[in-house]
Amino acid sequence: MMKIAIIGGGAAGMMCAATLAEKHDDNVSVFLIEKNSILGNKVIISGGGRCNVTTGIEDTEEVLKKYPRGKNLIKFAMYNFPPSKVYDWFEEHGVPLKTEADLRVFPRSNDGGDVVGVFENIFSKKDVEVMLKTKIENVKKKGKKFVLDLANGSYLEVDKLVITTGGQAYKTTGSTGDGYSFAEELGHIITPLAPSLNAFILKEKWVKDLAGVSFKKSGLKIIGDKTSKFEGAFLFTHNGITGPAVFALSSMAAFELSDLKKEVKMFIDFLPEFNYEEMAEKIRKALKENPKKSFVNTLDFFIPKSLAEVICYDIGIEAKKVNSEISKYQINKAVEWLKNATITVVGRSAGEEFVTAGGIDSKDINSKTLESKIRPGLYFAGEILDVDGFTGGFNLQAAWCTGRLIGESIS
Ligand SMILES: Cc1cc2nc3c(=O)[nH]c(=O)nc-3n(C[C@H](O)[C@H](O)[C@H](O)COP(=O)(O)OP(=O)(O)OC[C@H]3O[C@@H](n4cnc5c(N)ncnc54)[C@H](O)[C@@H]3O)c2cc1C
């Protein structure tokens, strides 16, 4: 009888166990080991409790572009179990889904609990031994077997080991990063880790005057060892910025931003559709056509009034100053603000998702099976891998497809 242990009953672990259960080999026993008292804690709270299961993007190459790290490692797994197959799989297992206008896919019930319910249902009927409230403390190799030390003092000896302990974001969900030390114990290298998909806290005091003001399309940029840029929607909060473009930039520049003990400068282009000269020309034209109008009420042709007020205050233009009194220097200053406003990132705050960038070094993993090249019989899936995606269902999609591939390759 072959014994397979899966450490971590999150998205990847559940999908791996379900795949093994569906193959239903009588000569195999599967142990799904989870330290929480329930399965899929993070899946339940994901997507604000609605669980953004996957993406509605159909072209798999396009899907792979949403992973700033790890796309080569998961390419085979992604083609094997792409978003469309994930969609069908959940529907076939009794969870009707819907694709929203922004191509995020959710259960029609808007309840992440239904997604976990699918797996509970499978495990109640098929031969998977679900071991809840069971924390693995340690993992060792003994001959061809793996020995798992349980927190209660007992141990489990297995032939194959799948580690799906997740990353280390939102530790209260149980994903505390234990798997990294298990992997190191077994000879694997962990690449540097950094949080990703977060909102930012800014140093500038004027931010609170803009709380709630949103921009449909702005350019955000961070210049570090490399320059990261993203164009999209964002929103000011009472102490910083958030929104899709902010999450995407936090992902692209995860390592530039990993140490926020030192301040990081970020640049906003509020009007990326115009270049500097076009912007200056538009302002000059507006001033000429409206000589008696105040400058602040002219700037708000282009941007929300509250931002126009912040800009005028910053460049020393009094509210009552009319356009005929504005100097060339002040026009240039305003253009600089609109095209290249400098803000200072001093911290991060929770986004709608939160993941760990970095993980098990991909060079030691066979991408066709996700088996370790160092320890035959050892596999990794989900966020513990050096794989992370943007918001929009891509992180769960990575967990589903990697968990699935291991289930299939072991079977
Ligand atoms: C707030 C939030 C919202 C999110 N929303 C979305 C979303 O809508 N869409 C999306 O695609 N992604 C989302 N994500 C990201 C996504 O949830 C994760 O990337 C995904 O759950 C990773 O799956 P995993 O199986 O690798 O790890 P996890 O789901 O984190 O599961 C790991 C499991 O391992 C268990 N474990 C850890 N150590 C041990 C141990 N020593 N012994 C036993 N068990 C152990 C943990 O308790 C945990 O249950 C969100 C993340 C957060 C934090």
Image (cartoon, rainbow, N blue to C red):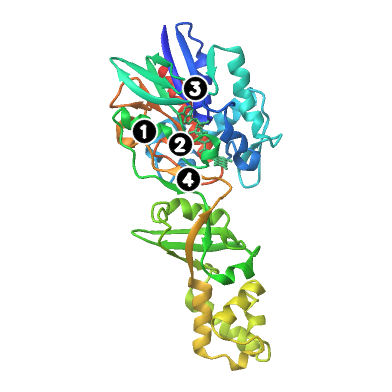
Tell me: is circle 1 under 8 Å from ligand 1.
no
Tell me: is circle 3 under 8 Å from ligand 1.
yes
Mark 3 vs mark 4, CA separation in Å: 30 Å
Where is residue 376 drawn, in percent x and y?
Answer: 31, 21
Amino acid type, mark 4: Lys
In this rendering, the answer to whether 146 lies above or below 303 is above
Q: Which residue is mark 4?
A: 66
Q: Is residue 193 left or right of residue 26?
A: left
Mark 4 vs mark 1, CA separation in Å: 28 Å
Splitting the image into 4 quarters, where does residue 259 fall?
Answer: bottom left
| Residue contact between numbered discs 3 and 1, judged by CB atoms under 8 Å | no
Amino acid type, mark 2: Glu
Q: Residue at x 60, y 18 (%)?
A: 122
Amino acid type, mark 3: Ile
Quadrant in which the C terminus is drawn: top left
Pair 3/4: label in front: 3
Tell me: is circle 2 under 8 Å from ligand 1.
yes
Q: Residue at x 55, y 36 (%)?
A: 173
Pair 4/1: label in front: 1
Q: Give whichever of 118, 177 is nearer the camera.
A: 177
Q: Which residue is mark 2?
A: 383
Label located before the other in sequence (3 or 1): 3
Q: Give whichever of 88, 159 is nearer the camera.
A: 159
